[in-house]
């Protein structure tokens, strides 16, 4: 299931910080590769990407930094610019399946994200078992990897959660959802994959960490169901021929160990963040050949119903079919929680992260976290 060692297409080196840009447009040391260690001893390979505007302001000093992997990132100029500026913002990026932090459109994504706002840094990791990270991937481990990176940003770089946006694409949406759910329900406790039936009468968690926003691009609702429709590269079906046989659905559900039940996690996340200012954004392209856009529509419905609670089953989900030109729907409880669904025509499965829809979703999240009003920002 995890294509952790597959390298697709022409690649750049992940361990240097000079060859991720075109040769005629190098910004030496704009990225700093480094490592962080999880609580279970896995060593994760990570990138810190500086905002281009900030890089320009300190270019000569940044270029003096030795290239390559930083043995102690806290001593780098980039880290100092991140941790000492009270206006610093961070996008924590969780990439999709296969490859590494520099695979495919991922470096283009970092360029787009670091050009939009002067103070916005990007932090990203390769999950355990991917690229230069140690260990083997599984659901618990990948969520722990994400939690480790978030804790590093908050504790080492001193960035408060209201200045952090979690961004996930494809597999990364499941990781981002798991991380958001963990911090909203049990930030000091261990990672739990158990999703017991909710107790609607229970109070919201007293200790919770809520981020400026969670932006999910090309998400899926539940992995066993996705496998029955998923096509590698948009062309090669895995289990699609088995869909007509209902007993095979139960068999797939039984065989697949890592369920990645994002629909249930987001519903519980919405219950946990009641009374806070929280922003969830779901973005999906209708021409996504890998994951059907209806997954994001279903996540929007489950998230809204989770927010409403007992009355959620009565939420009117009509009008969420895409005819032509895409779809935008937004739900707010008037007290801080806001959920936005954007179904767009173009972007495919991977390139969409470089499109303005995603940058705008992130900007809206930061703006809304900083605003005094809880009204949606259109």
Image: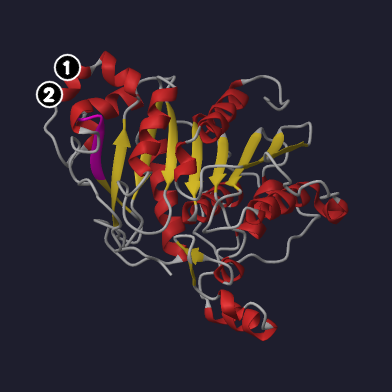
Left or right: where 362 falls relative to 75: right
Query: Could you tell me which secondary element the residue under label 2 belongs to?
Result: loop
How many numbered circles does the render carry?
A: 2
Return the x and y of residue 377 as percentages of the image width and height: 67, 25
Q: Is residue 172 visible?
A: yes
Q: Which mark is residue 207?
A: none
Label 1 environment density (alpha carbons within 10 Å; few <14, some 14–19, many ≥20)? few
Query: Quadrant where the N terminus lies?
Result: bottom left
Residue drawn 67% across the image and 80% down it: 244
Return the x and y of residue 201 as percentages of the image width and height: 81, 55
Q: Residue furthest top?
A: 57
Return the x and y of residue 282 as percentages of the image width and height: 61, 44
Q: Nearer the viewer, residue 5 or 90?
A: 5
Color encoding of the figure: secondary structure
Q: Are marks 1 and 2 in contact (CB under 8 Å)?
A: yes
Residue drawn 37% across the image and 35% down it: 110
Q: Is residue 27 visible?
A: no
Please state the extent of the stretch shown in magenta in the rendering: 29-34
Q: Nearer the viewer, residue 123 or 131?
A: 131
Residue corresponding to mark 1? 60
Residue 239 belongs to magenta span: no
Principal secondary structure, stretch drawn in magenta: strand
Residue corresponding to mark 2? 64
Up-down: is 324 above or below 57?
below
Give the alpha-carbon distance from disc 1 to disc 2, as whole Å.
7 Å
Up-down: is 138 above or below 302?
below
């Amino acid at each position: 299931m995890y294509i952790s060692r597959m390298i697709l297409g022409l690649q750049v080196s992940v361990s240097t910080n000079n060859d991720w840009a075109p040769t005629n447009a190098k910004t030496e040391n704009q990225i700093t590769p480094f490592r962080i260690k999880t609580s279970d001893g896995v060593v994760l390979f990570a990138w810190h990407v500086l905002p281009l505007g900030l890089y320009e302001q300190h270019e000569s000093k940044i270029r003096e930094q030795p290239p390559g992997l930083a043995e102690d990132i806290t001593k780098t100029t980039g880290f100092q610019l991140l941790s000492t500026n009270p206006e610093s913002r961070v996008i924590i990026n969780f990439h999709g399946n296969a490859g590494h932090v520099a695979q495919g459109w991922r470096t283009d994504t970092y360029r787009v994200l670091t050009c939009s706002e002067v103070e916005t840094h990007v932090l990203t990791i390769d999950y355990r078992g991917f690229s230069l990270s140690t260990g083997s991937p599984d659901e618990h481990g990948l969520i722990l990897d994400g939690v480790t990176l978030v804790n590093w940003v908050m504790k080492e770089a001193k960035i408060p959660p209201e200045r952090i946006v979690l961004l996930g694409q494809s597999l990364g949406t499941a990781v981002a959802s798991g991380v958001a759910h963990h911090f909203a329900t049990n930030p000091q406790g261990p990672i739990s994959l158990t999703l017991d039936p909710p107790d609607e009468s229970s109070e919201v968690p007293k200790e919770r960490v809520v981020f400026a926003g969670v932006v999910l691009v090309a998400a899926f609702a539940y992995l066993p169901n996705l496998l029955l429709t998923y096509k590698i590269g948009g062309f090669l079906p895995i289990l699609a021929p088995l869909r007509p046989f209902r007993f095979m659905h139960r068999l797939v559900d039984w065989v697949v160990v890592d369920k990645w039940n994002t629909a249930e996690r987001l519903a519980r996340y919405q219950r946990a963040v009641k009374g806070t200012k929280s922003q969830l954004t779901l973005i999906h392209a209708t021409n996504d050949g890998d994951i059907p856009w209806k997954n994001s529509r279903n996540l929007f419905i489950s998230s809204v119903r989770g927010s409403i609670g007992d009355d959620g089953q009565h939420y009117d989900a009509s009008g969420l079919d895409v005819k032509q030109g895409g779809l935008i729907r937004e739900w707010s409880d008037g007290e801080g929680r806001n959920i936005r669904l954007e179904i767009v025509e173009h972007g495919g499965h991977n390139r969409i992260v470089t499109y303005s829809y995603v940058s705008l979703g992130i900007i809206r999240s930061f703006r809304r976290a900083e605003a005094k009003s809880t009204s949606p920002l259109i």
